[in-house]
Amino acid sequence: MTPALEIDNLQAWYGESHILHGVSLAVQPGEVVTLLGRNGAGRTTTLRAIMGLTGARTGSIRINGVEAINLPTHRIAHLGIGYCPEERGIFASLSTEENLMLPPRLAGRDAGMSVDEIYAMFPNLYERRRSQGTRLSGGEQQMLAVARILRTGARLLLLDEISEGLAPVIVQALAQMITTLKAKGYTIVMVEQNFRFAAPLADRFYVMEHGRIVETIAAAELQASMPALTELLGV
């Protein structure tokens, strides 16, 4: 089976700062994978490098078998990948539904989730569909940022710290969302600081330190690996 995402010896820079030092990983279709690590370990930079949003990059990034290391960001998105950054990017002057309808669907892809399917998954967004972006809570903005990607037809999702700063009831709703998307065959790569949120969701964990992957842990190995993880992450 062709991996949904395969990275080999990825190096990335911001200006003259060398951030990623040979990252290699693979994610199979339908898997949920989490990048763990302390702040500054290179997790967000890895997601940004996949999307072509860093400076120079070398190595290999294959998305559904297509080499993307030299492609511009808009071409990378058309390979069926969606990125939800930590800052969410909600347009304050647009309503919830206008934000949802803004991104174009990916040409040659499945239509993506319909608006009705999205509202069924996120009832809060239906209730707030005519509210301006500035009037949404942090949790509702996070739901909208993910929902916007689902409508495009992207099947590989990069999610950066989606649980950060949110109330436990919203975090629980996001966990259910990831479980539902996995059941529908979506492939998800998450960056998460909230280990308790990520632990029951992921098939595999990659632990990063100083721009490198220093540990790979399968879900079945998680309990036995907790002492090492505690030392690496300080959880």
Image: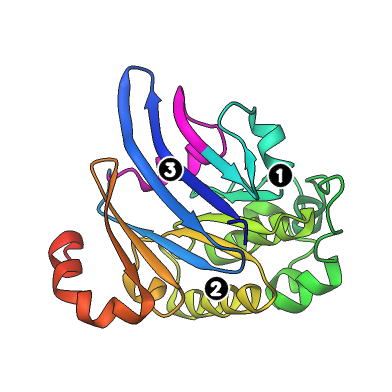
**With 170 as the anchor, is 2 left or right in this view?**
right
> Image height check: is 148 above or below 212?
below
The three-letter code of the residue at mark 3 reads: Thr
Tell me the magenta residue range: 41-60
Residue visible at 60% across and 59% down in the picture: 141
Tell me the quarter of the picture where residue 75 sits.
top right
Residue under numbered circle 2: 174
> Image height check: is 19 above or below 154?
above
Q: Which mark is residue 79?
A: 1
Q: CA distance from mark 1 to mark 2?
A: 25 Å
Quick check: can you spot residue 16?
yes
The three-letter code of the residue at mark 2 reads: Leu
How far from the left and from the top, in percent, is residue 224? 21, 80
Considering the numbered disc 3 on the image, is that residue within a helix, a strand or a loop?
A: helix
Residue under numbered circle 3: 46
Observer-side mark, 3 or 2, equals 3
How far from the left and from the top, in percent, is residue 219? 37, 77
How far from the left and from the top, in percent, is residue 129? 78, 64
> Image height check: is 60 above or below 142?
above
Q: Nearer the viewer, residue 158 or 103?
A: 158
Of pointers 1 and 3, the one earlier in the residue sequence: 3
**With 178 as the anchor, is 105 left or right in this view?**
right
Considering the numbered disc 2 on the image, is that residue within a helix, a strand or a loop?
A: helix
User: Badge 1 local density, few (<14 within 10 Å), some, or many (20+)?
Assistant: many
**With 67 as the anchor, is 104 left or right in this view?**
right
Q: CA distance from mark 3 to mark 2?
A: 22 Å
Considering the numbered disc 1 on the image, is that residue within a helix, a strand or a loop?
A: loop
Of pointers 3 and 2, the one earlier in the residue sequence: 3
Model colouring: rainbow
